[in-house]
Image (tube, helix red, strand yellow):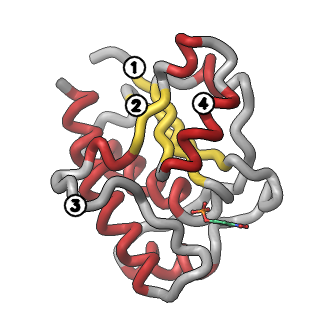
Amino acid sequence: MKKTSILFVCLGNICRSPMAEGIMQHLIEKTKLDNNILVDSAGILSVHQGEQPDKRMREAAFARGYKLNHRSRPVTTNDFDEFDLIIGMDDSNIAALEQKAPTLEAQNKIRRMAEFFSSQDIDHVPDPYYGGSQGFDLVINLLEDGCSNLLKEISK
Ligand code: 4NP
């Protein structure tokens, strides 16, 4: 299997994308693919740089058996060289990534998390930042489904 690197991207890199990273890391360790797949996450914004994931996201994650260790950082131009897949959570993340992509080849690395959902009822991972606690559980449900299908696609 070819080595694959994946960068998950959301707006602040303190809720959705570090959660996606934590779920994917858990899956690749469980399936002993941690030598073949590298995961990281980043944000469109740099305002939360250096911060741990949002406390509400960490608590929802912990309740579902995940520990999130990431520190927020912004997406860089270099990420488009370093990573094979750059996966945005919603339309605005994808639009911002397309603006940042330095080349056409870099643009072609951009994918949408919802492409990997089992059901097409929802086409993005909703931003939970300004909502209630149920938004964080929904994020985990969507990402568990999407990451599991993403892993199947990569392992083919
Ligand atoms: P995330 O959530 O993109 O899932 O990390 C957000 C975090 C922070 C902000 C917005 C969304 N913010 O506006 O600071």
Q: Where is 14 relative to 96, above or below?
A: below
Q: How far apart, in angstroms, are the residues tagged by discs 3 and 2?
A: 29 Å
Q: Which residue is mark 2?
A: 37
Q: How far apart, in angstroms, are the residues tagged by discs 4 and 3?
A: 25 Å
Q: Which residue is mark 1?
A: 3
Q: Earlier in the sequence, mark 4 or mark 3?
A: 4
**Type of the residue with mark 2:** Ile
- Tag 3 and tag 1, C-beta contact below 8 Å: no
- Tag 1 and tag 2, C-beta contact below 8 Å: yes
Does the rendering let one see residue 153? yes
- Tag 1 and tag 4, C-beta contact below 8 Å: no
Residue 15: quarter of image? bottom right
Q: Earlier in the sequence, mark 1 or mark 4?
A: 1
Ligand 1 sits in quadrant: bottom right
Q: Position of residue 56 (x, y in %)?
A: 56, 81
**Type of the residue with mark 4:** Glu
Q: Where is 53 relative to 118, above or below?
A: below
Identify the residue at image location x=76%, y=63%: 51
Does the rendering let one see residue 30? no
Q: Position of residue 155 (x, y in %)?
A: 22, 28
- Tag 3 and tag 2, C-beta contact below 8 Å: no
**Type of the residue with mark 1:** Lys
Identify the residue at image location x=48%, y=60%: 19
Q: Secondary structure at mark 3?
A: loop
Q: Which residue is mark 4?
A: 98
Q: How far apart, in angstroms, are the residues tagged by discs 1 and 4?
A: 24 Å
- Tag 4 and tag 3, C-beta contact below 8 Å: no
Pair 4/2: label in front: 4
Label at residue 121: 3
Identify the residue at image location x=61%, y=35%: 97
Judged from this view, the residue extending furthest toward the bottom is 132
